[in-house]
Image: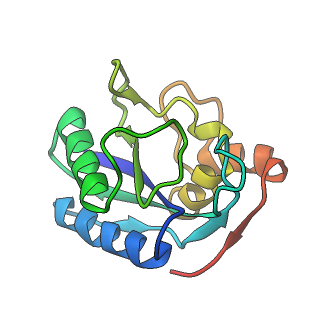
């Protein structure tokens, strides 16, 4: 199954943290092409005042892990990168990993909703995702990823930084 994962960091050496996380995600990748966007520097959304800028990226990998097990692996990577298990909503963090989609699977569970319910509203997810999967259209979507990005691009600022 193809799984999309959003990565974000706004504490510490953001570039090194994202590169290390991508290395760990590569270890979960099983076959086919492993896709990685460039890094995008973005304003914090719904975060406390004076929160540092985020560095964001998106990967798409192939895995046989079921969605909930993949989510557990992502949460373990966050903890290993220094993110506290208990944290405030939208607090600054060393690493944030969000499972965006798993093929055409739809889930509505307390711990996981797929596709991610707010990804079409977030430039910091859509911009890197559109780099690697511009034609992606998930269950419940009226448009492709690239079309959603075009529709909201002017709502938030972002800059492609480096890979």
Judge left or right: residue 37 versus residue 97: right
Residue drawn at the location 47% of the way across and 77% of the way down: 15
Answer with the quarter of the image where residue 23 lies.
bottom left
User: Residue 154 at x, y = what percent?
Assistant: 84, 52
- Its colouring scheme is rainbow
Answer with the quarter of the image where residue 21 lies.
bottom left
| Quadrant the N terminus occupies | top left
Answer with the quarter of the image where residue 67 lies.
top left
Residue 67's place in the image compared with 56, above or below, is above
Judge left or right: residue 34 versus residue 29: right
Residue drawn at the location 19% of the way across and 59% of the way down: 28
Residue 138's place in the image compared with 37, above or below, is above
User: Residue 132 at x, y = what percent?
Assistant: 51, 63
Residue drawn at the location 21% of the way across and 41% of the way down: 72
Residue furthest out toward the right: 154
Residue 136's place in the image compared with 104, above or below, is below
Count of numbered tags? 0
Judge left or right: residue 121 versus residue 110: right
Judge left or right: residue 160 versus residue 1: right
User: Residue 74 at x, y = what percent?
Assistant: 27, 49
User: Residue 60 at x, y = what percent?
Assistant: 37, 57
Residue drawn at the location 62% of the way across and 38% of the way down: 120
Residue 118's place in the image compared with 147, above or below, is above
User: Is 158 in front, or is 105?
Assistant: 158
């Amino acid at each position: 199954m193809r799984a999309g994962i959003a990565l974000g960091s706004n504490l510490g050496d953001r570039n090194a943290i994202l590169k290390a996380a991508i290395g760990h995600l590569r270890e979960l990748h099983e076959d086919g092409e492993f896709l990685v966007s460039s890094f995008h520097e973005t304003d914090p959304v719904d975060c406390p005042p004076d929160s540092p800028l985020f560095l964001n990226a998106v990967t798409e990998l192939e895995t046989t892990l079921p969605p909930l097990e993949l989510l557990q692996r992502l949460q373990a990577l966050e903890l290993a990168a220094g993110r506290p298990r208990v944290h405030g909503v939208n607090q600054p963090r060393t690493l944030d990993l969000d499972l965006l989609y798993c093929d055409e699977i739809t889930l509505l569970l307390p711990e996981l909703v797929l596709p991610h319910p707010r990804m079409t509203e977030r430039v910091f997810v859509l911009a890197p995702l559109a780099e690697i999967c511009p034609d992606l259209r998930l269950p419940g979507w009226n448009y492709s990823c690239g079309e959603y990005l075009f529709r909201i691009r002017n709502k938030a600022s972002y800059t492609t930084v480096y890979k």
